[in-house]
Image: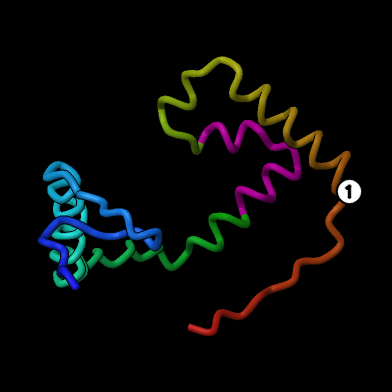
């Protein structure tokens, strides 16, 4: 029985198949970097920024203003870029109206306790 030389293989039909040097090089270029990257340590990500202690209160206040159609209060607390857009107040008033039509009037608020 003859042993095939490096880079050759045999199909089940017994016909020899010769791998070109380009095919071998391509396979090496795919396999070697993958194995090298699998051995490196994972990159640590920075910790997420801590929210201010009153962030829930701020969010509730903004939601109350939106639900109550107090667009002027919302616009007053926006950044300069958002205030400079002429349609901002109109868009907020439209959004407030859509929320009231679709969701209705708030009956109660359910507080979720954090497990942290």
Q: Along the line of sight, which residue is nearer the eye, 33 or 111?
A: 33
Q: Along the line of sight, which residue is nearer the eye, 104 or 48?
A: 48
Q: Secondary structure at mark 1?
A: loop
Q: Position of residue 3 (x, y in %)?
A: 15, 69
**Label 1 crowd (10 A; few <14 / some 14-19 / many >=20):** few
Q: Where the N terminus falls, by quadrant?
A: bottom left
Outermost residue toward the top in this view: 86
Outermost residue toward the front in this view: 1
Residue found 54% across the figure and 55% down from its top: 58
Residue found 16% across the figure and 68% down from its top: 2
Is residue 71 on the magenta stretch?
A: yes
Q: Position of residue 96 (x, y in %)?
A: 75, 36
Residue 20, compared with residue 14, is above or below; it is above
The part of the image, by quadrant, that contains residue 22 is top left
Q: Which residue is mark 1?
A: 104
Range drawn in magenta = 61-76
On the picture, is 5 further left or further right than 79?
left
Is residue 33 on the magenta stretch?
A: no
Q: How is the image coloured?
A: rainbow
Q: Along the line of sight, which residue is nearer the eye, 104 or 40?
A: 40
Q: Position of residue 62 (x, y in %)?
A: 61, 48
**Prevalent SS, magenta region:** helix
Residue found 72% across the figure and 29% down from its top: 93
Q: Position of residue 104 (x, y in %)?
A: 88, 48
Residue found 76% across the figure and 67% down from its top: 109
Residue 64, compared with residue 45, is above or below; it is above
Residue 114, compared with residue 12, is above or below; it is below
On the picture, is 1 further left or further right than 5?
right
On the picture, is 92 further left or further right than 50?
right
Count every numbered label the image shows and give the total. Answer: 1
């Amino acid at each position: 029985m003859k042993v095939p030389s490096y880079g050759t293989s045999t199909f089940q039909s017994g016909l020899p198949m010769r791998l070109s040097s380009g095919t071998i090089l391509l396979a090496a270029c795919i396999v070697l970097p993958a194995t090298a990257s699998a051995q490196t340590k994972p990159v640590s990500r920075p910790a997420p920024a801590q929210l201010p202690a009153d962030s829930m209160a701020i969010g509730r206040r903004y939601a109350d203003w939106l639900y109550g159609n107090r667009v002027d209060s919302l616009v007053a607390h926006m950044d300069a870029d958002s205030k400079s857009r002429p349609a901002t107040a109109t868009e907020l008033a439209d959004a407030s109206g859509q929320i009231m039509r679709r969701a209705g009037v708030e009956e109660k608020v359910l507080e979720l306790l954090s497990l942290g």
